[in-house]
Amino acid sequence: MMRSGIALILAAAVVLPLALSGNAYYSGLAAYAAILGLFGLSVNLTVGYLGYISFGHAAFYGLGAYAAGLLVTKRGFNFWLALLLAPLPAAALGALVGFASARVGGAYFAIATLTTAEILRLVAANWMDMTRGPLGLLVQRPRVAAIESFGLVFHQYYLAICLLVLALSLEIVRRLIKSPVGRSWATIRESSALAESLGMPAVRQRVVNIALSGALAGLAGALFVPRTLVLTPELFSPTLSATGLLIAILGGKATLFGPLLGGLTFALLPEVLRFIDEYRIAIFALVLLLVVRLQPSGLVAFIPRLRGDVVKAPAFPAGDPALQFRPAETLSATGLTRRFGGLTAVEDISLAIAPRELVGIIGPNGAGKTTCLSLLSGFLSPSEGAVTFGGVTISDGAPHAAARSGLIRTFQQTAVTPRNSVYENVLAATYNRQPEHVWACLIQNAAYRKREAQRAAQAMACIALVGLRHRADDLAGSLPYGELKMLSIAAALAANPRLLLLDEPAAGLNHTEANQLSVLLRKLRDLGLTVGVIDHNLRMMMALCDRIIVLDRGRLLASGSAAEVRANPAVIKAYLGPGWNKGDAHALS
Ligand SMILES: Nc1ncnc2c1ncn2[C@@H]1O[C@H](COP(=O)(O)OP(=O)(O)OP(=O)(O)O)[C@@H](O)[C@H]1O
């Protein structure tokens, strides 16, 4: 559907200019709708797909317009060449704003865009020599004599170019959102911790997204130049930023064609309502409010075929899935200590997990198990000590770097992308198998397509392995708790682990589900994976693990087989308190 939608716009680029040959007004309106659709597409990339609200996308739009205008007026560039160059400064600005705010969170991005647009507006208003300030920079209509010699007039080929640029931009976004890079945006939008745990560099991917969004907004701004011919500081106005945001939300967030419907509405509705002149804006606002109130998913929800955003799982191959793991490595921690202010959560812990071991970490509440797991997986830096995996220090790296080396963790609170299907969740997690460059995702050559097919097959194998075949196309948010836990393990497996660290995978599971989990974990160990498990289900842990490590009050209390740990008086005391007697030891069985 997505492809045919883009093909339709390409067809419109040929047919509409001919059909509207005698009507410059409608032709101009159609071009304006295409420009607003492109602007909405750029806003939607960040707001919808990345989950970062922008209050100042006019910064990129205005910069694109001024870049094109200045290249033409001050440097004598041909406008159509300037149109190709104008997205570059907007992309650079996007990367800069993205880099400055990607680490600290979405609220800062919203403020950073708002501030950037205002600064640019002031620069444009006051740099009289360059921009002529509020008087406006005047640009000549960029007529192309060669095209006009075929009998076409300006408004016709301008419309054709606007629609061609829109179709090309849609194709770029379509390719990206269906690629490992775009799938990582959906995961980052849900939780950057989840994304990092699966090997996705959240900051870098945010910067890529915002830079691309800036480039598309800059392109929209540059395309607007031949329509306005006078560039004023109002191109950076908050009203324009709000328009872009509304187009994206009204059309349908995180959908490819939603912003087009939004752009069409914003271009046409004020014109359609022109006959009621002074009430026009009020009625326009009312229509907007009604749509947003009655259909929060946006206009695109009225045309389900246009949504086109669900990726169906391919058919499962018959028989057991072939899933191979990378060669195992040893995880070692020496002298690990982690303090939170005055509290020492983990103190001087040294341990090793050997290749293909199934190790349990137990301890009473607050013993420091999760802190220890976060230190081992690079999610926390130790106050003292170090962690090495396969001889390489990981404690200073970002969590995604630990995941890259094969240390994959899960979370106590199950983390998935609820609005995506089981298959989409697991497919996104294959990112770590072969991280793709954004250019490879755009070009999509034969080698890339082969890798995509491999990723799909691996995702299916992981889903089958955890027993969720029948759920592949169901939304993750609709799964019961036990299956959600299995889904997070499937995603972790898809991320190509050498060592899997699971934080309380049996929490909330009933007896049958806990048994199924035990069977799965043993199977993974037998397939060659090293597994570390934290859990409070002592019965399961004692029966399951090759070795048990016991923590108490941040310190390592004991390490050994289930029988050794069960018979250790210090362990029994930690669990049962100082008044324990030998007969109570069965509580640990
Ligand atoms: N980010 C943090 N900031 C401050 N204190 C923390 C932080 N994380 C953990 N702690 C404290 O460190 C101690 C150990 O917590 P941790 O969650 O590692 O224990 P746990 O053994 O996993 O507990 P549980 O079994 O209840 O999950 C607790 O006292 C906890 O309050």
Image (spheres, rainbow, N blue to C red):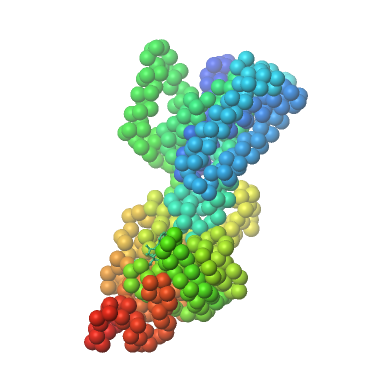
Q: Position of residue 157 (x, y in %)?
A: 64, 24
Viewer-proximal residue, 420 or 379? Answer: 379
Q: Is residue 103 visible?
A: yes
On screen, residue 264 above or below 22: below
Q: Residue at x 53, y 19 (%)?
A: 26
Residue 512 left/right relative to 7: left
Q: Residue at x 44, y 69 (%)?
A: 346
Q: Position of residue 354 (x, y in %)?
A: 52, 80
The quarter of the image holding the C terminus is: bottom left
Residue 583 left/right relative to 492: left
Q: Quadrant of ligand 1?
A: bottom left
* Quadrant of the image occupied by residue 42: top right
Q: Position of residue 405 (x, y in %)?
A: 57, 67
Residue 564 left/right relative to 442: left
Viewer-proximal residue, 443 or 231? Answer: 231
Residue 76 left/right relative to 520: right
Q: Residue at x 49, y 69 (%)?
A: 337
Q: Residue at x 42, y 74 (%)?
A: 555
* Quadrant of the image occupied by residue 467: bottom left
On screen, residue 127 above or below 173: above
On screen, residue 248 above or below 589: above
